Amino acid sequence: MTNQLYLKDSSVRTFEATVERALDNRVVLDRTHFYPEGGGQPADRGRLVAEETTLSVTDVQKRDTVYHHIDGIPPEPGTTVRGELDAERRDVLSRYHTAQHLLSAVLLEAFDAETTGNQIYTDYARLDAAHDRFTETDLADIETRLNELVTADTPITWYTMDRERAETRLDPERTRIDLLPDSITELRIVEIEGPEGDVLDRTACAGTHVEQTGMIGKVTVTGRETAGQGEERLRFELD
């Protein structure tokens, strides 16, 4: 099983690893900082460098382990490689993912609207929430609140917790543990501190995030649409 190093440290962009398996155009490493697609966040891109060979990483997927899809013949098992993430792509996706957490917290705080889905891209993101309809005034208020939280520049931290302990100690509305498969027994909890030192958001999440809300940048809510009965979809962009 690949050691998923990004779960502990999202800031690393270059690392060394050993090839464990080579399968057609896929490589399994003993350790990785490449994020596999999941939770609404696209996979990282980048390259693997082995001696004089450079292979582009075109996709990363997690099944029984993490598979790095490459554009050439994979190195032999036992080969030491250097992984190099597309740093700009990772930075953008981390900013958007953290902004999505902020938006989820604001909607729950102001409208009692739970997040029901989300999808992140490199140039915008969307979030679905259980709410009848947001007005233009609502959208403006949401945008103002989001940017207040960005300006506050509060810390974001993450840690692991046993699922049984988390289910008894943490707020299920915020952590959304019930959405996770029963097979997941250890959770990674992401916390965003509020301006008053309180916990603004605390969610079970395996994605990558920035370390301060100020790193998100200015948020612009670009619109809404109906995503189904009693469900709204919001779109937003970052500078």
Image (cartoon, rainbow, N blue to C red):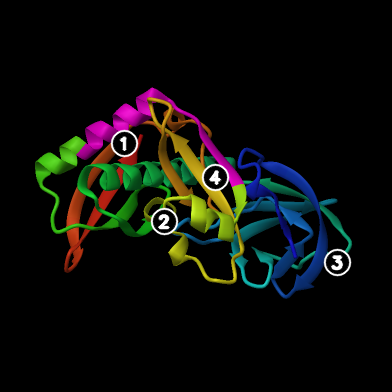
Can you identify the residue that label 1 sits on? 219
Residue shown at the point (26%, 57%) measured from the top left? 129
Q: CA distance from mark 2 to mark 1?
A: 27 Å
Mark 2: amino acid: Pro
Q: CA distance from mark 2 to mark 3?
A: 45 Å
Amino acid identity at mark 4: Arg
Image check: 193 left or right of 220?
right
**In the figure, residue 2 lies in which quadrant?**
bottom right
Residue 86 percent location from the top left of the image? 59, 45
Task: Write the residue at 54% across / 48% down.
Answer: 189
Q: Which residues are magenta?
A: 142-159
Dot 2 and dot 3 residues touching (CB under 8 Å): no
Residue identified by numbered label 2: 172
Q: Residue furthest bottom?
A: 24
Residue designated by label 3: 76
- 76 vs 133, left or right, is right
- Residue at the image point whose x is 70% and y is 69% from the top: 26
Circle 4 SS class: helix
Front label number (4 vs 1): 1
- Furthest toward the right, the residue is 78
Q: Are marks 3 and 1 in contact (CB under 8 Å)?
A: no
Give yes or no for residue 146 being in the magenta stretch: yes
CA–CA distance between discs 4 and 2? 29 Å
- Discs 2, 1 touching: Cβ within 8 Å: no
Q: CA distance from mark 4 to mark 1?
A: 18 Å
Q: Position of residue 182 (x, y in %)?
A: 55, 71
- For the stretch drawn in magenta, what is the main secondary structure? helix
Q: Residue 67: x and y, percent?
A: 67, 66
Query: What SS does tag 3 mark?
Result: loop
